[in-house]
């Protein structure tokens, strides 16, 4: 079955019933992701109710200006927590000052090292600074660039640092040629697939709130971009998720 390596379950107006819908569609594992202490606690609670769900705890760059990293670190010892994040830099919206984003990103890299957890990175229009901070802090051995939006050049820089690339529904968008070219360059043992639900619904569901049940559509588009069968992509991405998040 497919593994959704990054979703936000539950979200406003939608509960855990979306997990059953996804299971019926062939999705067998889920990583539900925190973006601040409140959503991190909710993700952990969801994971605690399901044997096939795991959680992350972190501060999204949008919320860096008000980050409570002590609260995040206190959550990392919970048994269903498998990663720090999502964290990183977002220069598209700049909802938090860039210096605050950088400080909070660096601190969460240190948390991943300290607790031997995977690191889930959000990088949007901030590649140079993202790589510079990673290099300064040291890249954790299990680092994921979630919702990868770069092209082949950015993919090579991430892969050179030992990172894994996770592709969302963007890989199915007609305008996302660079993302598909990056996927084609990514080795199958360094690739994952995600929905980022409720965001970024894949073709043919554009314009709707995304759902984990639509992960197979993302996987099919990723397989086509990579030149392999959907079955090969399903197996490869699940094995990578098992290794990165230690959920085998």
Image (cartoon, rainbow, N blue to C red):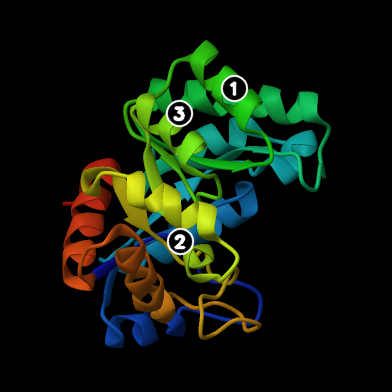
Tell me if label 1 and label 3 are in contact, CB under 8 Å: no
Q: Earlier in the sequence, mark 3 or mark 2?
A: 2
Q: Nearer the viewer, residue 93 or 77?
A: 93
In the displayed structure, does residue 35 sit left or right of residue 29? right
Q: CA distance from mark 1 to mark 2?
A: 27 Å
Which mark, by number, is residue 142? none
Q: Nearer the viewer, residue 134 or 242?
A: 134
The residue that appears at 26% across and 44% down in the rendered structure is 187
Q: Quadrant of residue 69?
A: top right
Residue 79 visible in image: no
The residue that appears at 66% across and 28% down in the rendered structure is 104
Q: Earlier in the sequence, mark 1 or mark 2?
A: 2
Q: Residue 51: percent from the left, percent from the top? A: 25, 66
The residue that appears at 49% across and 78% down in the rendered structure is 211
Q: CA distance from mark 1 to mark 3?
A: 18 Å
- Which secondary structure lies at badge 2? helix
Q: Earlier in the sequence, mark 1 or mark 3?
A: 1
Which residue is label 1 attached to?
106
Which residue is label 2 attached to?
45
């Amino acid at each position: 079955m497919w593994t959704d390596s990054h979703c936000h379950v539950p979200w406003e107006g939608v509960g855990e019933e979306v997990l059953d819908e996804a299971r019926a569609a062939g999705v067998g594992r889920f990583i539900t992701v925190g973006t601040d202490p409140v959503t991190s606690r909710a993700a952990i609670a969801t994971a605690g109710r399901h044997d096939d769900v795991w959680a992350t705890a972190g501060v999204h760059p949008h919320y860096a200006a008000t980050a409570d990293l002590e609260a995040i670190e206190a959550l990392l010892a919970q048994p269903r927590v498998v990663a720090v994040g999502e964290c990183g830099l977002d220069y598209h919206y700049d909802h938090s000052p860039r210096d605050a984003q950088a400080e909070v990103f660096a601190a969460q890299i240190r948390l991943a090292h300290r607790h031997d957890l995977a690191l889930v990175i959000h990088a949007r229009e901030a590649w140079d600074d993202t790589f510079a901070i990673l290099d300064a802090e040291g890249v954790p051995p299990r680092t994921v660039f979630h919702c990868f939006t770069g092209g082949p050049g950015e993919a090579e820089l991430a892969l050179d640092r030992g990172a894994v690339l996770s592709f969302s529904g963007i890989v199915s968008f007609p305008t996302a040629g660079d993302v598909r070219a990056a996927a084609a360059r990514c080795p199958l043992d360094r690739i994952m697939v995600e929905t980022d639900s409720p965001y970024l619904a894949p073709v043919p569901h554009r314009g709707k709130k995304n759902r984990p049940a639509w992960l197979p559509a993302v996987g099919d588009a990723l397989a086509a971009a990579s030149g392999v069968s959907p079955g090969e992509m399903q197996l490869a991405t699940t094995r990578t998720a098992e290794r990165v998040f230690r959920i085998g």
